[in-house]
Amino acid sequence: MLVTTPPPALPEGLRGDYAAARPDFTVVQNMADYSDADHATWRALYGRQAECLRERAAAAYLAGLERLPFRDGVPDFAASSAVLRRATGWTLVAVPGLIPDDAFFDHLAQRRFPVTHWIRKPEELDYIVEPDIFHDAFGHVPMLAQPDFAEFLAAYGRMGAHAKRLGALKPLARLYWHMVEFGLLREDGRVRAYGAGILSSATETLHATESDKPRRLRFDPWRVLRSEYFIDDLQPTYFVIEDFSELYAAVDRLPALLEAARDAAPIPPGAAAEGDQPYRLTGEE
Ligand code: HBI
Ligand code: FE
């Protein structure tokens, strides 16, 4: 059966061609489909972000970026997968854009990271509503070469089916949002970004690592699972880890925490909560 429009589980108006997708929502990445303008858009985004991130991204992210063939234009997923496979056993699969939760979790559990195959238009350099290849590849993929993070993300995928049975998909999605999209790491006494939503945006990078406006809190899974978020504005709250092993360490406690978070009152975006441990930008703590 052909799927002609995004399935009902997805928001309307997505620009990907879902009719071309296989049942697991993957498509073929055809390098010949990218125009010179597409490669130029990638290079413009890459050049600007690589410069912005030199002093602001986590060392593990920058090390991953260095190993991947991302510099010269829209990356070939097969070549990137070869690098990741050796590092952590992950591979990339091409998708038309956002895919349903079940398919997304299943890919992660199998160490396949879904990457949107199309790139934004030149007039969208600063902001795009849907994730494109720049967000998915430049933002997410370098961290897949970090062993602790790579383990965590596969374990996260394995939690998907369990969370769905519990009726706890919302709390599980909050963990992804705050720690995979917008996570911060303390490194040499400074705040560095490793979350893809930060790293693929120049504005969010400065806001997350240098502004005194947002709240920065010590990572606490129970706090994160209850924390609501904005999808279309700079984040008012970020969570800071000290080491990537903290994320994987939280997975053991997830089944119980998800159930409790499902039944707890959510914390509105940017709000304070009891027990918050603020982290100061230049603080020794
Ligand atoms: N699909 N391609 C893609 N990328 C995502 O980040 C993504 C998705 N589908 C579902 C989804 N994320 C969310 O439900 C996660 O927050 C769990
Ligand atoms: Fe993302």
Image (cartoon, rainbow, N blue to C red):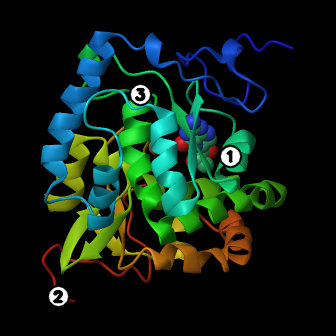
Q: Disc 2 versus disc 3: distance between alpha carbons?
A: 37 Å
Nearest the viewer among 268 and 219 is 219
**Quadrant for the C terminus in the image:** bottom left
Nearest the viewer among 80 and 164 is 80
Residue positioned 35% across, 62% down in the render: 238
- Badge 3 residue CB within 8 Å of ligand 2: no
Q: Nearer the viewer, mark 3 or mark 1?
A: 1
Residue at the bottom extreme, as displayed: 285
The x, y position of residue 221, in whole percent, is 53, 74
Q: Quadrant of residue 200?
A: top left
Q: Tell whether 24 sits left or right of 135.
A: right
Residues packed near mark 2 inside 10 Å, few (<14), some (14 to 19) or many (20 plus): few
Tag shown at residue 129: 3
**Residue at mark 2:** 284
Tag shown at residue 107: 1
Residue positioned 64% across, 33% down in the render: 99
Vertical arrangement, residue 215 with respect to residue 12, above or below: below
**1 and 2 marks in contact (CB < 8 Å):** no
Nearest the viewer among 18 and 62 is 62
